[in-house]
Image (spheres, helix red, strand yellow):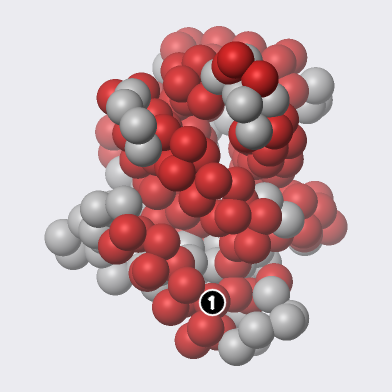
Protein backbone atom coordinates (compact mmCIF):
# COMPACT_ATOMS: atom_id res chain seq x y z
CA UNK A 1 0.00 0.00 0.00
CA UNK A 2 1.36 3.43 -0.95
CA UNK A 3 1.67 6.39 1.41
CA UNK A 4 -1.21 8.13 -0.38
CA UNK A 5 -3.43 5.05 -0.05
CA UNK A 6 -2.61 4.85 3.63
CA UNK A 7 -3.48 8.51 4.06
CA UNK A 8 -6.90 8.07 2.52
CA UNK A 9 -7.83 5.38 5.04
CA UNK A 10 -6.18 7.03 8.06
CA UNK A 11 -7.80 10.43 7.72
CA UNK A 12 -11.24 9.23 8.77
CA UNK A 13 -9.79 7.49 11.84
CA UNK A 14 -7.77 10.47 13.05
CA UNK A 15 -10.51 12.98 12.30
CA UNK A 16 -12.94 10.90 14.37
CA UNK A 17 -10.49 10.63 17.28
CA UNK A 18 -9.67 14.34 17.15
CA UNK A 19 -13.37 15.24 17.23
CA UNK A 20 -14.13 12.76 20.03
CA UNK A 21 -11.18 13.75 22.25
CA UNK A 22 -11.40 17.46 21.53
CA UNK A 23 -12.38 20.00 24.16
CA UNK A 24 -15.97 19.41 25.31
CA UNK A 25 -18.85 21.42 23.89
CA UNK A 26 -22.62 21.21 23.64
CA UNK A 27 -22.25 20.16 20.01
CA UNK A 28 -19.85 17.38 20.92
CA UNK A 29 -22.23 16.16 23.63
CA UNK A 30 -25.12 16.05 21.13
CA UNK A 31 -22.89 14.01 18.80
CA UNK A 32 -21.98 11.58 21.58
CA UNK A 33 -25.67 11.18 22.42
CA UNK A 34 -26.73 10.47 18.84
CA UNK A 35 -26.65 7.22 16.86
CA UNK A 36 -23.94 8.30 14.41
CA UNK A 37 -21.28 8.48 17.12
CA UNK A 38 -22.03 5.01 18.44
CA UNK A 39 -22.08 3.50 14.95
CA UNK A 40 -18.74 5.07 14.06
CA UNK A 41 -17.22 4.08 17.40
CA UNK A 42 -18.34 0.48 17.08
CA UNK A 43 -17.07 0.27 13.50
CA UNK A 44 -13.63 1.47 14.59
CA UNK A 45 -13.65 -0.94 17.53
CA UNK A 46 -14.27 -3.79 15.12
CA UNK A 47 -11.56 -2.53 12.76
CA UNK A 48 -8.92 -2.33 15.50
CA UNK A 49 -10.11 -5.27 17.63
CA UNK A 50 -10.96 -3.07 20.62
CA UNK A 51 -13.89 -3.89 22.88
CA UNK A 52 -16.69 -1.33 22.48
CA UNK A 53 -18.03 0.40 25.59
CA UNK A 54 -21.17 -1.02 27.09
CA UNK A 55 -24.18 1.07 28.08
CA UNK A 56 -24.52 4.79 27.45
CA UNK A 57 -21.54 6.65 26.00
CA UNK A 58 -22.85 10.18 26.59
CA UNK A 59 -23.22 12.07 29.85
CA UNK A 60 -26.68 13.21 30.94
CA UNK A 61 -26.23 16.73 29.61
CA UNK A 62 -23.67 19.20 28.21
CA UNK A 63 -22.61 20.48 31.63
CA UNK A 64 -21.94 16.98 32.92
CA UNK A 65 -20.18 16.12 29.66
CA UNK A 66 -17.82 19.06 30.13
CA UNK A 67 -17.25 18.32 33.82
CA UNK A 68 -16.46 14.68 33.05
CA UNK A 69 -13.86 15.57 30.41
CA UNK A 70 -12.21 18.13 32.68
CA UNK A 71 -12.08 15.66 35.59
CA UNK A 72 -10.52 12.99 33.35
CA UNK A 73 -7.93 15.03 31.46
CA UNK A 74 -7.44 18.52 32.86
CA UNK A 75 -7.56 18.71 36.67
CA UNK A 76 -6.16 16.62 39.48
CA UNK A 77 -3.52 16.52 42.22
CA UNK A 78 -0.68 16.24 41.39
CA UNK A 79 -1.94 15.66 37.82
CA UNK A 80 -5.16 14.71 36.01
CA UNK A 81 -6.04 11.00 36.03
CA UNK A 82 -4.85 10.77 32.42
CA UNK A 83 -2.42 13.35 31.04
CA UNK A 84 -2.65 14.04 27.31
CA UNK A 85 0.90 15.37 26.93
CA UNK A 86 3.65 13.36 25.25
CA UNK A 87 6.27 14.95 27.53
CA UNK A 88 4.53 13.52 30.60
CA UNK A 89 5.44 10.00 29.48
CA UNK A 90 8.90 10.80 28.10
CA UNK A 91 11.53 10.03 30.73
CA UNK A 92 14.47 10.39 28.34
CA UNK A 93 14.31 14.08 27.46
CA UNK A 94 13.47 17.36 29.20
CA UNK A 95 9.95 18.70 28.69
CA UNK A 96 11.31 21.75 26.87
CA UNK A 97 13.19 19.54 24.40
CA UNK A 98 10.08 17.46 23.65
CA UNK A 99 7.97 20.56 23.06
CA UNK A 100 10.66 22.17 20.91
CA UNK A 101 10.90 19.09 18.69
CA UNK A 102 7.15 19.18 18.16
CA UNK A 103 7.31 22.83 17.15
CA UNK A 104 10.08 22.09 14.64
CA UNK A 105 8.01 19.31 13.07
CA UNK A 106 4.96 21.56 12.85
CA UNK A 107 6.85 24.46 11.31
CA UNK A 108 8.50 22.27 8.72
CA UNK A 109 5.13 21.23 7.30
CA UNK A 110 3.13 24.40 7.89
CA UNK A 111 1.05 23.03 10.74
CA UNK A 112 0.79 26.11 12.93
CA UNK A 113 -1.30 25.82 16.09
CA UNK A 114 -4.81 27.17 15.71
CA UNK A 115 -5.54 30.69 16.99
CA UNK A 116 -6.56 30.55 20.64
CA UNK A 117 -4.92 27.17 21.17
CA UNK A 118 -3.33 27.39 24.62
CA UNK A 119 -2.24 23.75 24.86
CA UNK A 120 1.47 22.86 24.64
CA UNK A 121 2.69 21.66 21.25
CA UNK A 122 2.98 18.08 22.55
CA UNK A 123 -0.71 17.86 23.53
CA UNK A 124 -2.60 14.98 21.93
CA UNK A 125 -4.95 17.31 20.05
CA UNK A 126 -2.00 19.06 18.41
CA UNK A 127 -0.36 15.74 17.56
CA UNK A 128 -3.54 14.47 15.90
CA UNK A 129 -3.95 17.70 13.95
CA UNK A 130 -0.37 17.33 12.71
CA UNK A 131 -0.86 13.72 11.60
CA UNK A 132 -3.99 14.81 9.73
CA UNK A 133 -1.95 17.59 8.10
CA UNK A 134 0.65 15.07 6.92
CA UNK A 135 -2.05 12.82 5.48
CA UNK A 136 -3.54 15.78 3.60
CA UNK A 137 -0.10 16.57 2.16
CA UNK A 138 0.32 12.95 1.05
CA UNK A 139 -3.02 13.03 -0.74
CA UNK A 140 -1.95 16.13 -2.67
CA UNK A 141 0.91 14.02 -4.04
CA UNK A 142 4.02 15.22 -5.78
CA UNK A 143 7.74 14.59 -5.36
CA UNK A 144 7.70 15.45 -1.67
CA UNK A 145 5.49 12.55 -0.57
CA UNK A 146 8.42 10.35 0.48
CA UNK A 147 9.79 13.21 2.60
CA UNK A 148 6.40 13.55 4.29
CA UNK A 149 6.36 9.80 4.90
CA UNK A 150 9.81 9.82 6.48
CA UNK A 151 8.84 12.76 8.69
CA UNK A 152 5.69 10.91 9.73
CA UNK A 153 7.69 7.81 10.63
CA UNK A 154 10.14 9.88 12.67
CA UNK A 155 7.38 11.81 14.44
CA UNK A 156 5.50 8.64 15.32
CA UNK A 157 8.63 6.82 16.40
CA UNK A 158 9.97 9.64 18.55
CA UNK A 159 6.89 11.38 19.88
CA UNK A 160 3.46 9.95 19.08
CA UNK A 161 3.31 6.17 18.85
CA UNK A 162 4.29 4.99 22.32
CA UNK A 163 2.63 7.09 24.99
CA UNK A 164 -1.03 6.52 23.96
CA UNK A 165 -0.78 2.90 25.11
CA UNK A 166 0.33 4.09 28.57
CA UNK A 167 -2.48 6.64 28.61
CA UNK A 168 -5.00 3.94 27.69
CA UNK A 169 -3.74 1.69 30.49
CA UNK A 170 -3.95 4.59 32.95
CA UNK A 171 -7.54 5.28 31.88
CA UNK A 172 -8.56 1.75 32.78
CA UNK A 173 -6.56 1.79 36.02
CA UNK A 174 -8.08 5.12 37.12
CA UNK A 175 -11.60 4.07 36.23
CA UNK A 176 -12.34 6.66 33.55
CA UNK A 177 -15.75 6.46 31.81
CA UNK A 178 -15.87 3.54 29.42
CA UNK A 179 -16.13 5.74 26.34
CA UNK A 180 -12.81 7.43 27.12
CA UNK A 181 -11.12 4.12 27.87
CA UNK A 182 -12.30 2.90 24.48
CA UNK A 183 -11.23 6.05 22.63
CA UNK A 184 -7.75 5.94 24.14
CA UNK A 185 -7.43 2.24 23.33
CA UNK A 186 -8.42 3.02 19.74
CA UNK A 187 -5.85 5.79 19.65
CA UNK A 188 -3.12 3.46 20.87
CA UNK A 189 -4.03 0.83 18.28
CA UNK A 190 -4.25 3.40 15.48
CA UNK A 191 -0.85 5.01 16.07
CA UNK A 192 0.83 1.62 16.48
CA UNK A 193 -0.63 0.45 13.17
CA UNK A 194 0.21 3.80 11.58
CA UNK A 195 3.89 3.43 12.42
CA UNK A 196 4.02 -0.17 11.18
CA UNK A 197 2.30 0.61 7.87
CA UNK A 198 4.29 3.80 7.29
CA UNK A 199 7.56 1.94 7.82
CA UNK A 200 6.42 -0.82 5.47
CA UNK A 201 5.42 1.68 2.76
CA UNK A 202 8.80 3.41 3.00
CA UNK A 203 10.71 0.12 2.88
CA UNK A 204 8.74 -1.22 -0.11
CA UNK A 205 7.77 1.74 -2.33
CA UNK A 206 6.01 1.24 -5.69
CA UNK A 207 8.45 0.06 -8.34
CA UNK A 208 10.80 -1.55 -5.82
CA UNK A 209 12.94 1.52 -5.11
CA UNK A 210 14.11 2.03 -1.55
Query: In the displayed structure, does residue 93 sit left or right of residue 124?
Result: right
- Label 1 neighbour load within 10 Å: few <14, some 14-19, many 20+: many
Q: Nearer the viewer, residue 155 or 30?
A: 155
Q: Nearer the viewer, residue 97 or 49?
A: 97
Q: Give the quadrant of residue 84.
A: bottom right
- Percent of width and height locating residue 2: 55, 19
Query: In the displayed structure, does residue 104 sit left or right of residue 80?
Result: left
SS class of the residue under badge 1?
A: helix
Work out which quarter of the rendered image holds the C terminus and state it.
top right
Residue 172 visible in the current orientation: yes
| Residue at horizontal 43 percent and vertical 78 percent from the top | 100
- Percent of width and height locating residue 48: 74, 23
| Residue at horizontal 72 percent and vertical 56 percent from the top | 162
Name the residue tied to disc 1. Answer: 98
- Percent of width and height locating residue 165: 76, 51
Work out which quarter of the rendered image holds the N terminus and state it.
top right
- Percent of width and height locating residue 132: 40, 37
Q: Please say if 24 is above or below 149.
A: below
Residue 136 visible in the current orientation: no
| Residue at horizontal 72 percent and vertical 40 percent from the top | 192
Q: Please say if 152 is above or below 144.
A: below
Q: Please say if 62 is above or below 200.
A: below
Amino acid sequence: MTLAELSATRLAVYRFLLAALNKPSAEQHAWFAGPDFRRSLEALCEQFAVAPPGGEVAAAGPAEHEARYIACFEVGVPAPPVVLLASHYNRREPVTAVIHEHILFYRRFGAALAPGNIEPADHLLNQLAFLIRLDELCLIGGPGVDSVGRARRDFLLRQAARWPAWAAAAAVEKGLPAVYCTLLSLLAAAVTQDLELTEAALEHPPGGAS
